[in-house]
Image (tube, helix red, strand yellow):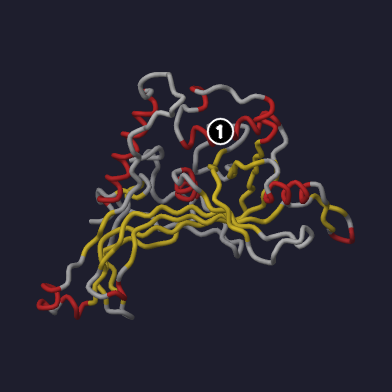
Amino acid sequence: MNSHSAATAGSCEQWKTKDGKRRKSTPSIDTGIEVLGLPFHLPRLKLRKHKTDVKCFHKGRYDYRTVNTIVDETPILHVSFSASAEEGDPPFPVILPMLGCTSAYPDPSLPDKSESRVVYLHGYVSSRILRLAKAADGKSAEGVNGSAKPNNGIPICVVATQFDGVVLALTPNHHSCNYRSAVIFGHAHVVTDEPERLHAMELITNNLVPSRWENTRYPNATELKSTGILRVEIESASAKIRAGTTGEDRNDLKNEEMRRRVWAGVVPAYMQWGSPQPAPTNISGDVPKYIAGWVEKGNKENEHYAYEVAK
């Protein structure tokens, strides 16, 4: 299904939630439908409050693998942080689109369900978020009895969202969307260790387009110096997934006249890569196989997933 299709459901490794507790995801049984490469049971739930007949999977998850997979498969992450009163910024939260992914340095071979993974974010070295993180890393916070302790960096929130379809029920109140989302809370630090910086740059590049880093010109000294890397040490994280078809009011299901008049179902949605367009300066010839293969594979997987979870 995707790069993490070897995953198994019901992983016991869990991220901590904001209250500091670890929560276990509900184990699932395979019914032929995969969510994030994991087999999920889509049960018929009878919700007494709304008297609905639901055939969908709509649940929070706290295991590392689910959270990491959503982050790594989302091309653009949204990163939120607080503005700095010292710099005279307006008193509003800041949200930026950024490139990033998860990894476990110095051993990137650690499985994606590992607690050791962090989030790496790519940005311009003089951007506001990099400046704030660098300033925070240079300070010390007051510890117990006035003693100094290392600063935790700047607190940030990283959000990844994938949109998989519009769910159109018989009544607007039961409309929904199929989606996958992950929210990460942590502290961001500027990476200054050069081997780790290079690891993150290569990782982020290849996470966007596999094998791209080794098939390009190596960055020169000026380019490397102008590139900033943030390492987000995760404090807590969670994911939420909605997959499946409509949930209908039981009384609506008894109204055949209305059901003949109102169409109900799911309109799948998925990211579709287009045909690669050469730059005016390109003289290398045909599109390389690694790019063409990535486009074809990604389009097939994205379409397959969106239609599978619409059932």
Q: Which quarter of the figure is the N terminus placed in? A: top left
- SS at circle 1: loop
Residue 283 lies, in percent from the top left, at 43, 19
- Please tell me how crowded label 1 is: few (under 14), some (14-19), or many (20+) other residues with Cα within 10 Å: some
Q: Residue at x 45, y 33 (%)?
A: 209
Question: Where 41 sits versus 6, above or below?
Answer: below
- Residue drawn at x 58%, y 23% is 218
Q: Is residue 28 above or below residue 256?
A: above
Identify residue for label 1. 108
Q: Nearer the viewer, residue 76 or 178?
A: 76
Residue sitting nearer the eye, 249 or 166: 166
The residue sitting at the right extreme is 146
Is 267 or 38 nearer to us in this picture?
267
Q: Position of residue 243 (x, y in %)?
A: 32, 58
Q: Position of residue 213 (x, y in %)?
A: 52, 27
- Residue at the top extreme of this rendering: 284
Residue 16 horizontal side relative to residue 3, left or right: right
For the residue marked with disc 1, what is the amino acid? Answer: Pro
Quadrant hosting residue 260: bottom left
Quarter of the view holding residue 19: bottom right
Q: Quadrant where the C terminus lies?
A: bottom left
Side of 184 where 193 appears, left or right? right
Compared with residue 288, is residue 307 higher up or lower down, i.e. above or below? below
- In the rendered image, which quarter is residue 278 located in? top left
Is 296 on the left-hand or right-hand side of 71?
A: left
Residue 146: percent from the left, percent from the top? 89, 60
